[in-house]
Image (tube, helix red, strand yellow):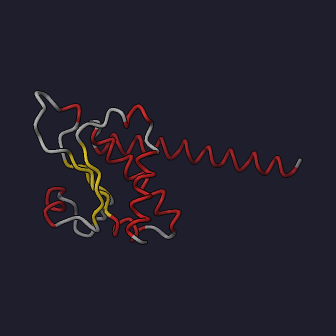
Amino acid sequence: MEQEKFENLVEEGIKAIPKKFLEMLDNVDIVIEEEPTPYQLSKLKERRGSIILGLYEGIPKTKRWQYGQVLPDKITIFKKSIEGVANSEQEIKEIVRNTVWHEIAHHFGMDEKSVRGASQRRFAKIFCGKIKNNDNKRNQHLN
């Protein structure tokens, strides 16, 4: 995917975050890189071959005391990793949106277990909504 198109998907992912959370984002940059650096991978202590879609580096809002005059936190979205796991442009769009949401949740202090649990609930809600919408469309078509 062209860089500009991918950047637009990341911007869409950011805009999909509820306004009340976007307004509370504080001192954080969101950037796109092709893939994680060896240093980033070593900090994560991930198993060899792990696929990293995004990364939050910084001090979560819940752990900030006497916070000031510091470099911004950084959220990195990894383009090659996302393209490697997606089967279509639509999947890339969904993965980017979910990855942006996931990393912003870390900025607000959620640990990996909490983010994954919230993601599962969020996906279930979206998935159930899609099933309900498809059922409604089928029923309308039959009437």
Q: Which residue is pictured at 46% across the width and 45% down the height? A: 16
Farthest-out residue, top? 66
Residue 76, quarter of the rendered image = bottom left
Q: Nearer the viewer, residue 40 or 11?
A: 11
Q: Nearer the viewer, residue 8 or 116?
A: 8
135 vs 9: above or below: above
- 16 on left or right of 127: left
Q: Percent from the top left, x then y, of residue 124?
A: 53, 45
Residue 120, quarter of the rendered image = top left
Q: Which residue is pictured at 36% across the width and 33% down the height? A: 23
In the rendered image, the quadrant that contains the N terminus is bottom left
Q: Percent from the top left, x then y, of residue 56?
A: 25, 49
Farthest-out residue, right? 143
- 36 on left or right of 101: left
Q: Nearer the viewer, residue 61 or 126?
A: 61
Residue 31, quarter of the rendered image = bottom left
Farthest-out residue, front? 4
Q: Percent from the top left, x then y, of residue 104?
A: 33, 43
75 vs 87: above or below: above
- 60 on left or right of 140: left
Q: Which residue is pictured at 39% across the width and 42% down the height? A: 117
